[in-house]
Amino acid sequence: MTLIDLGDARAAAEPASVPFNLPRLRRLALAVLTAVGLAAMTASTPPAPSRVRPLWTTAFRPSDTVAMDSRTVYLNRSSPSGPAEVVAYDLRTGRQRWSTPTGDAYGIRPVGDVVLVTTGPLSIGVTSASPGPRTIALDAATGTRLWESAGASSPSAAGDEVLLAVAGQSGAITGLRLVGLRDGRQVWLQSITPAEEWTTLTEGGRHTAVVTVTGTGDVTDYGYHDGAVRHRGRIPWNGVYSATFFPAGAQLVVIRTASAQTVASIYRAADLRLLWRSDELIGYVTGCGPLICTAGVRGVAGRDPATGRQAWRRDDMNFVWDVGAGRLLLSAAANLASATTVLVDAATGRTIGGPLGGQEAFVAGPASSLTLLRATGRPDDRTAVSRLDLADGRLTILGTVDRLAEQGCQGASGYLLCPRGDTLTVTAVG
């Protein structure tokens, strides 16, 4: 048998001898330690802090009414066991400032240093057995009752006076009163032909007139500061499913719906002369900054209020919202979450910034901005909060919070007020 010499196996397993390079070993160790340190720093760096922070909550019922200004939350808290009251909370801390019994209210509106509370039933449905709406004025700082009067206050109350519309037994408006905002002192009182609707006209930021319309289309124009009749006329009004009107600068927009057709007629407010009438199938009409917008299945158009001339048109959009600062939101669907939404210039219809997909609601934000709310969906099902700059359309994501009832939210500069189940939540934004 022949033997083959394989040598010493232990010797073969030993590595070959190489020179020892100490500087190179140091550089290698330094590189490894640097890489490990960077990885550890990256892993431990916290995410950018959320700019959305829940502040406080309070109990809330569906029958409660809430409003806010830059400092205070006003909540009309209904109670099955006692009289309803208005409670004022510090917006930032939730500390209760005051509470005042008022009765059930369907309207709370801060106006300067006064809070106007409208109690009683709505004008529609008032009977001889039930009193009409009443307005209670409270001092915003202390809750002290300043005055109380029959009538619902004008939504456009501003300055040192407030206009009240008094309802009769049938629910129609039978009187107008202008009173001092803080003292309730009567400036003038005007009994009127029972009217279905009324509105105020504004020029240069000041109220100039009050316009009423009866069920048969009789229109009367009263001076805002003296209640004197300035003009009377008649417009088509009855014989339709619904009719309403609103001011647009020096114009009065009358909207009548019959069957599936909605027609808008625009009148000069000073003398009720017909200026133009919509000539296409529209869904609705609304003010759009300096223009009047018609919207429907054929698109959105911005029109000159005095002539009806089309200034711009967007056939790719069907719904419009005037968000102030000369800007509009346009969408292809009423449900913002299911369609692309764009910010546009009100005067030209030009898109500003990128598309805003998936938003569920928007509320007022700091000056020249909107706060946008969007559901994040599963698995966490939270509400994402963003800020839209109305000047350039820039969208900034601020953070997320526990899911909010987006459609019921109100906004003020730096704050968000939202009902959530049986609570009312105040959140700091930005």
Image (tube, grey):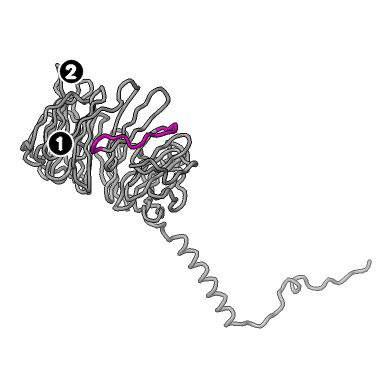
Q: Can residue 312 be seen in this view?
A: yes
- Residue drawn at (23%, 38%) of the image: 270
Would residue 374 be seen by someone viewing this image from the given angle?
no
Q: In which quarter of the image is residue 247?
A: top left
**Horizontal arrangement in the rendering, residue 42 relative to residue 117 (left or right):** right
Inspect the image, locate mark 1, and give the three-letter code of the amino acid beneath it.
Leu
Label 2 or label 1, whichever comes before in sequence order: 2
Secondary structure at numbered mark 2: loop
Picture coordinates of residue 347, whole percent (x, y): 38, 49
Q: Residue 316: give x, y in percent of width and height.
A: 49, 42
> Count the marks: how many?
2
Residue 216, position in %: x, y? Answer: 26, 22
Q: Give the range drawn in magenta.
A: 269-283
Q: Split into 4 quadrants, where in the image is the N terminus?
A: bottom right
The residue that disc 2 covers is: 127
- Is the magenta region chiefly helix, strand or loop? loop
Q: Are marks 2 and 1 in contact (CB under 8 Å)?
A: no
211 or 165: nearer the eye?
211
Q: In this view, does 63 lie above or below 402?
A: above
Q: Is residue 276 magenta?
A: yes
Q: Which of marks 2 and 1 is in front?
A: 1
| Residue 92 covered by magenta stretch | no
Looking at numbered disc 2 in the image, what kind of residue is underneath it? Thr
Residue appearing at x 44%, y 53% in the figure: 353
The residue wearing badge 1 is: 163
